[in-house]
Image: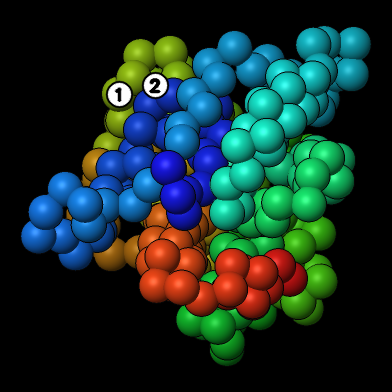
Amino acid sequence: MKHFFTIIGGMGTIATESFIRLINHRMEITCDQDYLNYILVNDAQVPDRTTYIKDHTKPNFFTALREDFLQQATLQPDFFVMPCNTAHYFYDDLANLTDIPFLHMMRIAVHNFVEKFPEQKKIGLIATEGSIYDHLYVDELNKVNRSAELGGPEIQPLVTKLIYSNIKQKGVVDAELYHSILRKMHDEYGCNVILLGCTELSLAQEQSPNHPYQVIDPQSIMADVVIELELKIRAGKDPQKVIQKYLY
């Protein structure tokens, strides 16, 4: 297979399924051959990211991801993409395993926010406890002179319930809960734009987009990015030059 990219997924599986669905359904196609070539590594056995980030005595998820990246590197994909925000905790370590470009989903999403909403100096952030705990998005926002609004102490338990109790444990999106979180962030904490810092939240947005709030959805943004990149590479453009604009 020529001109393909590798998706390191399974964190969780239903969110990865959403990412693939976005890519496939956004392609302009007239036949089977118009779709993109990719390999999906749905490694559902990767230990929970938040658990390790908050407590390093728990299983380290880097070990599983390292094996996935090295296995796939032997196949020489055009680039790697990993639809899990929290797993970017080990981005630098994973990127250094190989010379194959690895797209940084969080960084690309933050730059998309700046480009799309240049007048906004802060953004509401809802994410896993791991991403919040380790300032993964906060650090990226600070690099571009933006700040994150996390809301009050009642917000994180609601977000955690939506991600874990509903989506990860039951495979369902509680649309009412999702919309209530967005409403609180907007109405009570003055967030004109809200960043969905977890791919389960991206799944919630895909399934329940019927709300009036502005969101930055990293998984949706990355679906558009990989389509753009792979179509240009397929057309004969230099992969390194094409991808360089997204390696911030």
Q: Is residue 196 left or right of residue 183?
A: right
Please tell me which residue is depicted at 79% across the width and 44% down the height of the picture: 98
Q: Specify the quadrant that holds the C terminus.
A: bottom right
Residue 61 appears at what percent x and percent y?
75, 21
Q: Circle 2 sits in a helix, a strand or a loop, which is it?
A: helix
Please tell me which residue is depicted at 60% across the width and 37% down the height of the picture: 75
Residue 170 appears at what percent x and percent y?
35, 14
Residue type highlighted by circle 1: Val
Residue type highlighted by circle 2: Asn
Report the residue marked by disc 1. 172
Foreground residue among 223 and 220: 223
Q: Is residue 128 left or right of residue 5?
A: right
Residue 78 appears at what percent x and percent y?
57, 54
Task: Residue lying at the far right in this picture: please name it.
Answer: 57
181 w.r.t. 170: above or below: below
Whether the residues at callouts 1 and 2 have beta carbons within 8 Å, the answer is yes
Report the residue marked by disc 2. 166
113 w.r.t. 208: above or below: below
Q: Which mark is residue 198?
A: none
Q: Is residue 140 visible?
A: yes
